[in-house]
């Protein structure tokens, strides 16, 4: 028992308790998305009783959930009626073109989340408690979910990534999209350059999602697929551009360097690799979203990390790349790191 | 894919992603407490390598965990060395008398946390997925953990609660402490009034913790125990004061009223009941800690809630209490609601 209780205007344990209860925020938002609550709210301010009818849920449950979402800034409440905040209207109502609600499915995938229940053990061991390479074990179904549900987070970064990767290059361009996932990055290049041909590489089950997206975008005639592991399949080529999006962070530096060497060997002279990465500052504690991504890599991989620009530059150089530069993406937390084959 | 990507200065999905990742904050803090990291940090600023040795953990794990704790404000970092923030020094270093680190054990108890993995289902049904009455099923071992580990959160509120409950009353006082838990509230009254006699009521396994605390406080000769359910055991009496701490919120209003009637019947004329509760404002969305507690009651009980003062006042009145008043506790998020037997 404390000798002296904390005083109201002095230091407070509020941040500690807020952190110990933070998991409830994630649970509340996921539940609301699963119940399609943000769609119901979008039909106009409503009280708990009518939202409960709309969501086929209990009034007690909806009232407490909506109050909680109001407290954490994801709904507003006036006179007992709940309404969207600007954030929930744009980013959580499924009718909004910018909605990121679907990302809750991948971000809440048990594969990514359950290791956090054993985080002390992971910190002791220095690697995920998942077997083998963790989340990047072959044919992991989580990546099908990634391809399905993460497009709304990644989509806004596709256009700037395409501009950076193409760097104004017109005419026929061969693009290898490694770990293509939803395929949106290669598809965007195919849209920006009508003579670009894309080879999307990923597990077969994931490529089915990318191919469907390519058809939907009308670029399927210039969109090929290659199923398998980036470490094993022949990259063919030579290519003008290789995309490496959200990939390097899963591996240790020697593995990244060896993959980057394979990438360089598949590029034409002067060709470029463009990696999309969470790149923290050299202090490794800013900016928050990029820097905190390291914890996900600790929990779910054997040896991955969110690498600083200096670390990535070192790996690129080691693999024989030159003219290495980082381009922060204005529409997302990521940075595109470009290197050129000599 | 959004028609128009969010602009850097416009609305941002940052709050949404922060919420979807919030569970990682809880996991990181719990892991750090389990690894005794805040004690190691308290021995002086140190780099990841020496902290890893001190915590018998991997350097990769410690470095990433410490960076994450720095990002969320629970450590500081300069020149690659980690140090306490004022908050972590006072509230997380186990050598600090005000440390609340042990509360992570109760707050992270699977009984309380696992229902949040099924929160959509709970909102649909309007009650916990736990069987029966949920967390208040008889002899639930979570309450032994509560008694052991929550004293640092509850302790600072004991002195003000004692003052409010005693209201200056000197001489012999009989106090019934319902759901005594760690026993600190009754013990504090025994300390404030040397002629007070306490009867602590809880499950037998929980009372063992309270009795040990009473011995440690030197009040064991005036500290009796009564094992069983508050709804079933004879309250004996008549008592001058009945404490009902952190109890009413687990039950629906009819159950609370029936218990309050039983309490009133066990009080002397003019005797008082003092309930320690999270009491949100009438808007039910402020203050944040009290208002958000409703979600824990939704997830873990059949029909509990964080009741507003008006609701509690109504239940007290219905049970025959008069002169009902709420006293916010200056040293914690709780309010003491006092009522008098006519």
Image (cartoon, coloured by chain):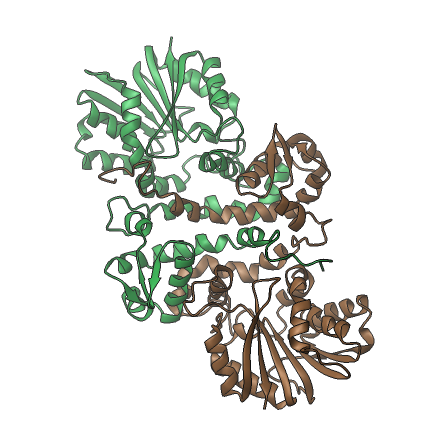
Chain colours: A brown, B green
Nearer to me, B168 or A273? A273
Nearer to me, B18 or B224? B18
In this rendering, does residue A145 appear at all? Answer: no
Quarter holding the C terminus of chain B is top left
Examine the image and state in which quarter residue A5 appears: top left
Q: Is residue A129 left or right of residue B178?
A: right
Q: Is residue B293 left or right of residue A92?
A: left
Q: Position of residue B193 (x, y in %)?
A: 20, 22
Q: Residue at left 39%, top 69%? A: A125
Quarter holding the N terminus of chain B is bottom right
Q: Position of residue A226 (x, y in %)?
A: 71, 80
Nearer to me, B123 or A243? A243
Q: How many marks?
A: 0
Q: Position of residue B311 (x, y in %)?
A: 50, 21
Q: Residue at left 49%, top 25%? A: B308
Q: Is residue A213 left or right of residue A337?
A: right
């Amino acid at each position: 028992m404390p000798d002296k209780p904390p005083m109201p205007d002095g230091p407070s344990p509020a941040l500690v308790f807020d952190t110990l209860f933070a998991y409830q925020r994630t649970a509340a938002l996921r539940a609301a998305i699963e119940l399609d609550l943000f769609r119901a709210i979008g039909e106009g301010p409503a009280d708990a009783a009518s939202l409960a009818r709309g969501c086929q849920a209990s009034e007690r449950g909806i009232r407490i959930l909506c109050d909680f979402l109001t407290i954490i800034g994801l709904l507003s409440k006036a006179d007992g009626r709940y309404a969207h905040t600007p954030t929930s209207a744009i980013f959580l109502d499924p009718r909004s073109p910018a909605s990121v609600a679907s990302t809750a499915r991948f971000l809440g995938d048990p594969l990514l989340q359950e290791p956090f229940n054993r985080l002390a053990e992971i910190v002791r061991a220095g690697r995920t408690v998942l077997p083998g390479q963790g989340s990047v074990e072959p044919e992991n179904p989580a990546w099908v979910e990634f391809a399905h549900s993460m497009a709304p987070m990644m989509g806004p970064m596709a256009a700037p990534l395409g501009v950076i990767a193409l760097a104004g290059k017109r005419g026929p361009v061969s693009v290898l999209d490694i770990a293509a996932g939803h395929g949106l990055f290669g598809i965007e290049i195919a849209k920006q350059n009508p003579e670009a041909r894309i080879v999307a590489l990923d597990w077969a089950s994931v490529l089915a999602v990318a191919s469907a997206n390519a058809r939907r975008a009308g670029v399927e005639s210039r969109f090929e697929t290659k199923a398998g592991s980036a470490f094993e399949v022949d990259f063919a080529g030579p290519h003008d551009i290789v995309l490496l999006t959200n990939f390097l962070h899963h591996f240790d530096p020697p593995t990244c360097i060896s993959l980057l060497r394979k990438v360089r060997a598949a590029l034409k002279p002067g060709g470029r690799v463009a990696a999309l990465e969470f790149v923290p500052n050299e202090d490794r504690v800013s900016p928050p979203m990029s820097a905190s991504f390291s914890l996900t890599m600790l929990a779910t991989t054997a040896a991955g990390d969110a690498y600083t620009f200096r670390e990535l530059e070192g790996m690129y150089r080691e693999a024989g790349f030159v003219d290495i530069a980082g381009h922060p993406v204005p529409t997302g937390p990521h940075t595109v790191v470009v290197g050129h084959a000599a």
